[in-house]
Image (cartoon, rainbow, N blue to C red):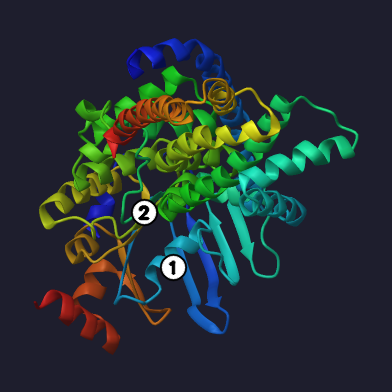
Amino acid sequence: MTFVDQWISWLPALTPGLGVSLTLTGLCLLFGMPLGLVLALMLEGPVKMLRAAALIVVEVGRGAPALVLLYLLYFGLPEGGVTLSAFATGVISLSWTTGAYASELFRSGLAAVPAGQREAALTSGLRGWSGFRYIILPQAVRISTPPLASLAVTIFQTSSLAFVIAVPELMSKAYALGSITFEYLSVFALTSVLYGSITLLALAFVRLAEQRLSRHL
Amino acid sequence: MELATERTVSPPTLGGVKVLGLHKSYGKHAVLHDVNLEMTEGEVVSIIGPSGAGKSTFLRCLNYLEVPTAGTITIGDSTVDAGARRPDRACLDRLRRVTGMVFQNFNLFPHLTVRENITLPQMKVLGRSRDEANAVADSLLNRVGLAAKSEQHPARLSGGQQQRIAIARALALSPKVMLFDEPTSALDPELGLEVLAVMRDLADEGMTMIVVTHEMHFARDVSDRVMVMADGRVLELGPSEQVMTAPTHERTKKFLRAVLDR
């Protein structure tokens, strides 16, 4: 039995885990990216209270390692009387991490839109929300997209940490398989191939998207 | 002055300009001292002077891109009183509604097509339908000679073309006064010409215009009056021909010698 046959025979044990990893990542991006944008707007906005609140959320999200944040919520939420599944806890925790990092990327994107664009929007009567929505935001998102996409890839890899709170994602499946077969090296080699192929595929998409986005600039 | 009498088309709206005692300072550093300007509807005034004179600052105060410290600005029927309190939203909106602005660096919206650049403000600000806005955009693009470019993105166009589109975008909101902030300074001389041609047409059609410029021919031939500024003050303001050929102020003479005898 070559290692290729072995890997093929292991795949059915690992693919459900990969599915969970992808779902977890997808949900974290779904909640985390908009959260990041909202946090960025709160940080840039004029209301002091909102700015302070956003600052705390962002600094905790970036200051605490994703692993620590997972544990904090996993053990902290039940203390506060909130009992969630491990998966839900993982989604909340990693969304927090995603949002915190994304907010900084959105902020730098907003800052990179030339001042002249704001002035042109103002003198075209597009002030406040409409100027932001139609003129500033599209350009900021365009600027932020490449770093946001690499953040998404990082979050996919970070989702492997959810293994520590018993989310049945790829890493935990791999660990379980290793403890049955005792072929840890081979199992984790396959696992890294799985993570790697998804990552490379995602990065290829990002490159395509970048080209599409920058075609008018 | 004969150019002024050539204007046969009467402007559609009532829009004179009256600026009284405009003052602007950053902290203790004053950049505009008591600038006054009265213009009748349809008049074209060029503002010339050395850099750092406050020409652009003055222009940008007129639509509150810069906040003046004191003075009154009346354009058409909207008046804004600068000073103690920042004027309310509605006041500023009205002021910006009656002014159109053209920037040195065009500032077209790069993520929109040429036509969308002109239609978006119309739809969002004036509430025009897409069809109405498109009709206006197409007729304006025709007027600046760029009808063929309507589906392009700005980055594909030359600087001169971009600036003509910026003029069309400003005109689409039917301003009463057009403010030009060194519209040709970022262009090479040839491309500058096509922009100046559009501006000349606009002047001939009776648009009220204030033009900050280093184009001395434009100042002399197209504008009715020339205002010379230096160090945040108005040195002189008079009929173009007179200011350009027989300036009274010593500083003006020096400046004109520098720009004309080169």
Q: Nearer the viewer, residue B15 or A135?
A: A135
At 38% from the left edge and 69% from the top edge, which residue is drawn?
A: B55
Image-based side of B139 in relation to A135, left or right: left
Tell me whether marks 2 and 1 sit on the same chain.
Answer: yes
The kind of residue on which mark 1 rests is: Thr
The residue labelled by disc 1 is B57
Q: Which amino acid type corresponds to the residue marked 2 in the rendered image?
A: Met
Q: Name the residue located 24 percent from the left edge and 37 percent from the top edge.
A: B144
Q: What residue would you read off at disc 2?
A: B209
Q: Residue furthest right?
A: A81
Residue A83 placement (x, y as % from top left): 84, 28
Residue B52, above or below B14: below
Horizontally, residue B52 falls left or right of residue B222, namely: right
Instruction: Relative to A174, say whether A141 is above or below.
Output: below
Q: Determine whether the residue tagged by mark 2 lies in a helix, strand or loop.
A: strand
Q: Is residue B14 above or below residue A182?
A: below
Please identify the quarter of the rendering in which residue B79 is found.
Answer: bottom right
Q: Earlier in the sequence, mark 2 or mark 1?
A: 1
Image quadrant where one finds the N terminus of chain A: top left
Residue at 17% in and 80% down: B258
Looking at the rendered structure, the number of numbered marks drawn on it comes to 2
Element class at badge 1: helix
Residues at discs 2 and 1 in contact (Cβ within 8 Å): no
How would you rate the neighbour count of disc 2 (Cα within 10 Å): few for under 14, some for 14-19, many for 20 or more? many
